[in-house]
Image (cartoon, rainbow, N blue to C red):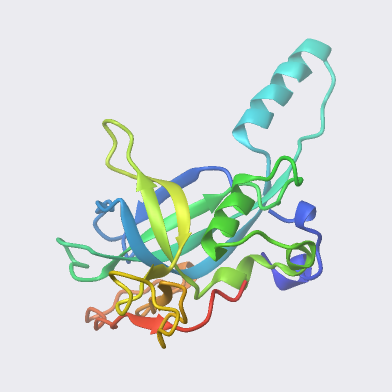
Amino acid sequence: MPEAETQGAKPSEIAANEGDFTVTQKEDGDFEPIKGTELLAVCCEFKYKGQRENKFDHEKRLRKQEETGKILKPKLYHNGFYNFQVNEEIEQGEFAGQRKEFRWFVNNLSFGSPSHPTDYKKHLESWRDRPFSDQELKAFHANNVVGVSCFLRFKYEDGKDRPKLAAILPARTHCPNCVQKVSADCDICKGKGKIWVKFEPVDYTPVDERVEEDENPDEVAEGAAEEAPPF
């Protein structure tokens, strides 16, 4: 969402429905769906797409207009999408060897209320491994998660090869020094038993600037990160 429109905006004014699909590294490349059920990933980009009426509200409004004969004002929601690179490679075609991408469409960029949080808020809190405080909600911007690693958990429907997003999980893994028993004196995890993992994006080109490249990007090794996600 453009900076001028979101800076200082209230969470209820900015804002996930589950409209998800996968794309390859290049939008005009051969389509190859994600196969894994839980993959390490990194958010590479947030793209704001403006305001629109969702399909359910649109159909409901049209029915009421037919019943009453009155023109009703549509209820608009801020929406956009997040692009992730995942730790799974395209196997065939022009872009073989490049990382696959997952695009998470967010049709309602609001947080809802404390008693009725939106799916957007639920996914973000699962990602950061803790709930938002009131102050954090007021300060949150949709771009805060760009560059942050995570695990994406997918669900597959019968007869469909394109997965949907089931959950966004924190990029944490078991400490290599505490496999059998967590040690309070461990220098790596500090007695927590798990460490944060950093998954760096590779030669990512924003959607609006996609161009064909001559060579595939080199692999970047995964490494441990000491700090939690910055959001």
Name the image quarter holding residue 61.
top right
- The image quadrant where one finds the C terminus is bottom right
Q: 218 left or right of 156?
A: left
Which of 20/211 is in front? 20
At horizontal 40% and vertical 57% (from top left) the residue drawn is 152
Name the image quarter holding residue 65.
top right
Q: Is residue 103 above or below residue 56?
A: below
Which of 154/202 is in front? 154
At horizontal 51% and vertical 43% (from top left) the residue drawn is 18
At horizontal 40% and vertical 84% (from top left) the residue drawn is 186
Q: Is residue 56 above or below residue 207?
A: above
Residue lying furthest bottom in this view?
Answer: 187
Residue 3: percent from the left, percent from the top?
72, 72
At horizontal 47% and vertical 84% (from top left) the residue drawn is 226
Q: Is residue 159 visible?
A: yes
Which of 187/204 is in front? 187
Residue 113: percent from the left, percent from the top?
76, 45
Q: 14 left or right of 47?
A: right
